[in-house]
């Protein structure tokens, strides 16, 4: 089975539509989303509705939980908190009810799924090999997928050695047939690894490989939508730089 993995859409319809178009040409059987459908961006309803229609499994991220009223706004920075308050005001009741049903963790096809990490599914950013080691100790599945950091990367461990990891540029791939793995597809709607293109990952469960993909999208259109909604300008400016 071939699965498209997406994460951290952040109400960026332009990016999500581009990624779904890219996925459509890749012969996938299912789409899994690791959370944060909303937050930061200006089109939360459109992104939630696309995710509801296109994904087989969808997790909740910390921004989703905040919009659903399950995480306090005090846990967010000023700009992120402002986006959560705005999102609560503009989203339909039906879509807020939908994200309230989502969980930050799950599993499918013997793959562990987490928005944050196996240790802390909501908030933990896994960005170092030392932290990945702790997560690999905690995970119940040999292969786990995580989001939240907005950085495409992979960590692996085998043969009693410590975990190692690296950033994953567009077009790179890993063979995951042996050892333990923690994989992050990067962010659809707000990449933070210096590449502003929308990110997603192709997971081939039969071939036991993962390939990291990027696609162009209308960054200016997404930024204009943020400004038109009178959301913090910094959230529009960062899209161009992939930060």
Image (cartoon, rainbow, N blue to C red):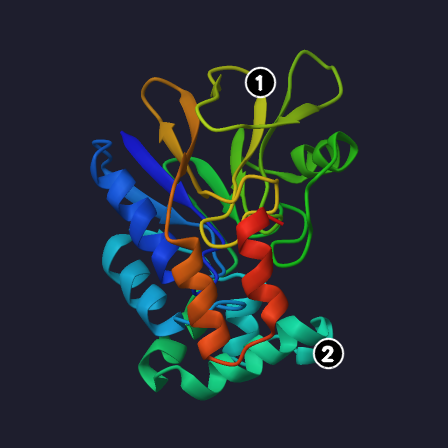
Residue at the farthest top position = 159
Q: Position of residue 227 (x, y in %)?
A: 50, 74
User: Could you say where residue 221 lies in the image, as x and y percent from the top left?
Assistant: 39, 62
Quadrant in the picture for residue 222: bottom left
Asked if labels 2 and 1 touch by Cβ distance under 8 angstroms, the answer is: no
Does label 1 or label 2 sit earlier along the sequence?
2
Q: Nearer the viewer, residue 109 or 3?
A: 3
Residue at screen point 50% across, 47% down: 187
Residue 145 drawn at (x, y percent): 51, 39
Residue toward you, 182 or 142: 182
Name the residue tied to disc 2.
74
Along the line of sight, which residue is nearer the eye, 20 or 103?
20
**Relative height, residue 97 to residue 129 (above, below):** below
In the figure, residue 46 lies in which quadrant? bottom left
Q: Which residue is mark 1?
A: 179
Relative to 23, 231 lies left or right? right
Assign a secondary structure to mark 1.
Answer: loop
Mark 2 neighbour density, 10 Å: few (under 14) some (14–19) many (20 or more):
few
Decide: is 147 above or below 42: above
**Label 1: how many Cα within 10 Å (few below 14, some 14–19, many 20+):** few
């Amino acid at each position: 089975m071939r699965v498209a993995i997406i994460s951290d859409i952040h109400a960026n319809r332009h990016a999500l539509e581009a990624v779904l178009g890219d996925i459509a040409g890749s012969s996938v059987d299912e789409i899994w989303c690791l959370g944060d459908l909303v937050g930061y961006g200006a089109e939360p309803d459109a992104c939630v509705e696309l995710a509801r229609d296109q994904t087989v499994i969808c997790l909740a991220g910390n921004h989703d939980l905040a919009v659903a009223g399950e995480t306090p706004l005090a846990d967010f920075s000023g700009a992120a908190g402002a986006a959560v308050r705005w999102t609560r005001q503009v989203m339909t009741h039906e879509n807020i009810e939908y994200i309230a049903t989502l969980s930050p963790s799950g599993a499918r096809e013997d793959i562990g799924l987490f928005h944050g990490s196996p240790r802390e599914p909501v908030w933990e950013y896994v960005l170092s090999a030392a932290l990945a080691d702790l997560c690999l100790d905690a995970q119940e599945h040999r292969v786990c997928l995580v989001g939240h950091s907005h950085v495409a990367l992979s960590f692996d461990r085998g043969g009693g050695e410590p975990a190692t990891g690296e950033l994953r540029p567009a077009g790179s791939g890993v063979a995951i047939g042996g050892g333990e793995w923690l994989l992050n597809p990067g962010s659809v709607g707000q990449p933070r690894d210096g590449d502003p293109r929308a990110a997603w990952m192709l997971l081939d469960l039969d071939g036991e490989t993962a390939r990291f993909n990027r696609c162009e999208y209308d960054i200016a259109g997404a930024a204009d939508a943020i400004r038109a909604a009178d959301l913090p300008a910094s959230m529009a400016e960062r899209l161009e730089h992939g930060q």
